[in-house]
Image: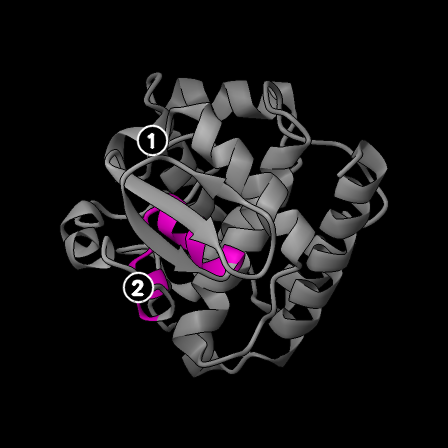
């Protein structure tokens, strides 16, 4: 994907996710997300902070005494105090802008909205298809980026193969499935397991014992 395609996809994903926000009931907002300890409401609030500027990020980091995990957690929890009716409008307001948090590539906002969209939709029983080219581009980014996912380290000895596009990574026992499921696997979501097959799947449960990361950059507590 070129840069324009990346941002066009981000815009579309934010727009459709905003539409989903507008539909959610109070019970759905309070539902635990795929991120351990985070409600759907908290993940949605985190997404509305995707365009946080340098000065605001510095303030939050100072307030968290330099702890990035705490900064991400605390900023999301504070944002989650806003009325839920605001979240759709806030996310929709980002459409058309290429502003992003400092120090990240264009692929991290795409990663955020793709994976967090599943963090919200899956526990609610909502179907949210993930665009295959975008999922493949982001999967490559996650596989090569190291922190915070350390995908190559966690999944060493396995060959990951997408069944719906030309994407593969690693060497060893085979794990295969749709690229959307592989992306969830790479980012530590055990919700991917039911959609994966191959002789390497038996050992995946133990490798997904750590809670998934809420940020495209840092682990949450």
- Visible in this render: residue 15? yes
Place of residue 137 in the rendered image (x, y in percent of width and height, measured from the top left): 62, 40
What's the magenta region? 179-194
Q: Residue at x 35, y 43 (%)?
A: 159
Residue 79 picture location, percent across and down: 51, 49
Instruction: Residue 127: name its quadrant.
Output: bottom right
Q: Residue at x 59, y 50 (%)?
A: 135
The local crowd at label 2, few if under 14, some if 14 to 19, many if 20 or more residues have their Cα within 10 Å, is: some
Q: Label 2: state its secondary structure.
A: helix
| Magenta stretch prevailing secondary structure | helix
Front in this rendered view, residue 53 or 15: 15
Query: Residue 131: horizontal and vertical position, in percent?
Result: 66, 59
Residue 48 seen in the current view: no
Q: Earlier in the sequence, mark 2 or mark 1?
A: 1
Q: Which of these two is toward me, 172 or 81?
A: 172
Query: Magenta includes 110?
Result: no
The reply, left or right, for residue 134 in relation to residue 79 is: right
Q: Is residue 35 above or below residue 62?
A: below
**Which quadrant does the C terminus fall into?**
top left
The quarter of the rendered structure image containing the N terminus is top right
- The residue carrying mark 1 is 152
Residue drawn where x is 50% and y is 53% of the image = 115
Q: Nearer the viewer, residue 140 or 89?
A: 140
Q: Which residue is mark 2?
A: 193
């Amino acid at each position: 994907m070129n840069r324009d395609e990346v941002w066009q996809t981000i815009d579309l994903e934010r727009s459709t996710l905003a539409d989903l926000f507008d539909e959610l009931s109070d019970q759905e907002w309070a539902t635990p997300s795929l991120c351990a300890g985070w409600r759907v409401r908290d993940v949605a609030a985190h997404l509305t902070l995707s365009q946080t500027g340098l000065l605001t990020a510095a303030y939050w980091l100072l307030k968290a005494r330099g702890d990035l995990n705490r900064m991400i957690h605390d900023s999301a929890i504070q944002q989650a105090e806003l009325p839920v009716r605001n979240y759709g409008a806030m996310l929709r307001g980002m459409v058309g802008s290429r502003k992003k948090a400092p120090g990240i590539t264009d692929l991290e906002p795409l990663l955020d909205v793709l994976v967090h969209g599943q963090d919200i939709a899956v526990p609610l029983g909502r179907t949210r298809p993930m665009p295959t080219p975008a999922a493949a581009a982001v999967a490559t980014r996650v596989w090569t980026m190291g922190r915070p996912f350390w995908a190559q380290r966690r999944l060493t000895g396995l060959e990951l193969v997408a069944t719906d596009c030309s994407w593969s990574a690693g060497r060893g026992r085979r794990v295969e499935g749709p690229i959307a499921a592989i992306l969830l696997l790479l980012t530590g979501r055990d919700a991917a397991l039911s959609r994966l097959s191959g002789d390497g799947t038996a050992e995946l449960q133990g490798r997904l014992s750590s809670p998934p990361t809420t940020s495209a950059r840092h682990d949450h507590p």
